[in-house]
């Protein structure tokens, strides 16, 4: 085997093995809001003083972040790159800080992956529920990644004929907010846990849609969903539960919909015999360590759930077209009630 082939393979393994190191560089930078201190050219000493880091250590971190394209460097001073300016400053144009901090909270459970592999169960949490900080990072993180996805859905699907959407597991309400803004006659009911809804209400108030969006507290695995909706939207929910729970949820959605109404399941759906995108299969392990019962599901599985619930044959839509070898992990499964 040629030496160049061996070198390529070993480099690939090195990159895989070093992934946790790069994630720690990013997470620690976010901990101290580093990118708010590098909006203008700054020295390592200035960054160290602002963050509480040792000057030499700050220089090492700044260089590491520069190699990843998050900073620019000239003559020993540093400033944000375009990606950092747009995505890594709280409140920036495409703020991703909440979702990245949510990913950082998974560090401890992923460090105990072997336990889950042996037991098949999630890693036990020290606390029964998320801390206030973790909950806000998670819910606001869903808004970070949901804004662009919501616009993509509006490009892929025409929802103009629907009047009342039930958004199950709505989180920050990002999707229903986008739908209501796009369709002035649409109303929405946002269904989520009691502890989540205060954050949901904040987002709806900022959007100026309190007159068209209602809230319903409940547990989506067991509480009544209501009835009379002509559109039900379930985004990134089914991966948290086992197949039996998801089948039951789809059946209850069928009963909650009016005749002719549509169910949209948005999730990391994979092909039955596929091996891409890698994100989806990595996410299945994320569900293992965090939920125990969660998984990623195939398009065949969700088709069976909706068919058995009574829906007409559904259709699957990629949220983004495949390009440059990249396959979007997110798909939409759409099924209509007769």
Image (cartoon, helix red, strand yellow):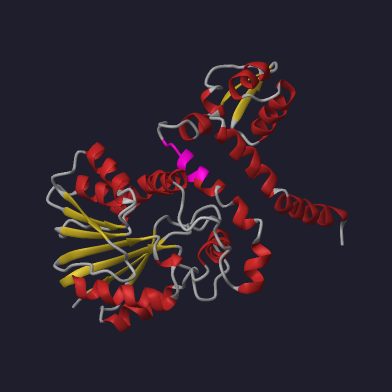
Residue at image position (34%, 70%) is 221
Closer to the camera in the image, 54 or 20: 54
Magenta stretch encompasses residue 127:
no
Tell whether 91 sits left or right of 42.
left
Tell whether 72 sits left or right of 220.
right
| Among the 4 quarters of the image, the one containing residue 121 | bottom right
Residue 28 to residue 121: above or below: above
Residue at image position (65%, 62%) is 113
Residue at image position (28%, 41%) is 202
| Among the 4 quarters of the image, the one containing residue 81 | top right
- Range shown magenta: 94-101
Tell whether 150 sits left or right of 30.
left
Closer to the camera in the image, 218 or 14: 218
- Residue 144 is situated, as x and y percent measured from the top left of the image, at 41, 43
Closer to the camera in the image, 4 or 200: 200
Residue 209 to residue 307: above or below: above
Tell whether 264 sits left or right of 61.
left
Closer to the camera in the image, 175 or 312: 175
- Residue 322 is situated, as x and y percent measured from the top left of the image, at 48, 57
């Amino acid at each position: 085997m040629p030496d160049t082939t061996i070198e390529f393979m070993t480099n690939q393994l090195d990159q895989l093995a070093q992934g946790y190191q790069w994630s720690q560089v990013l997470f620690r930078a976010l901990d101290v809001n580093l990118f708010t201190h590098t909006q203008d050219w700054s020295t390592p000493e200035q960054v160290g003083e602002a963050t509480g880091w040792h000057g030499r250590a700050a220089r090492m971190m700044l260089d590491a972040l520069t190699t990843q394209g998050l900073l620019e460097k000239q003559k020993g001073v540093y400033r944000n790159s375009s990606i950092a300016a747009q995505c890594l400053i709280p409140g920036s144009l495409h703020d991703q800080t909440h979702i990245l901090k949510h990913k950082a909270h998974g560090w401890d459970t992923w460090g105990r992956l072997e336990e889950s592999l042996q037991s098949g169960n999630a890693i036990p949490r020290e606390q029964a529920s998320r801390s206030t900080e973790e909950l806000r990072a998670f819910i606001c993180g869903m808004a970070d990644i949901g804004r662009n996805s919501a616009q993509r859905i509006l490009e892929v699907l025409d929802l103009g004929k629907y009047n009342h959407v039930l958004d199950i597991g709505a989180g920050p309400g990002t999707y229903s907010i986008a739908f209501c803004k796009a369709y002035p006659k649409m109303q929405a009911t946002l269904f989520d846990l009691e502890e989540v809804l205060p954050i949901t209400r904040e987002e709806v108030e900022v959007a100026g849609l309190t007159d068209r969006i209602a809230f319903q507290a409940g547990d989506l695995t067991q509480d009544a969903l209501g009835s009379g909706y002509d559109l039900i939207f379930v985004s990134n929910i089914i991966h948290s539960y086992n197949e039996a729970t998801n089948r039951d949820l789809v059946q209850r959605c069928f009963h909650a919909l009016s005749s002719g109404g549509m169910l949209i399941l948005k999730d990391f759906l994979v092909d039955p015999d596929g091996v891409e995108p890698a994100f989806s299969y990595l996410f299945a392990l994320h569900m293992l360590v965090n939920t125990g019962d969660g998984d990623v599901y195939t398009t065949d599985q969700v088709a069976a759930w909706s068919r058995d619930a009574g829906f007409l044959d559904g259709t699957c839509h990629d949220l983004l077209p495949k390009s440059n070898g990249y396959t979007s992990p997110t798909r939409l499964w759409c099924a209509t009630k007769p």
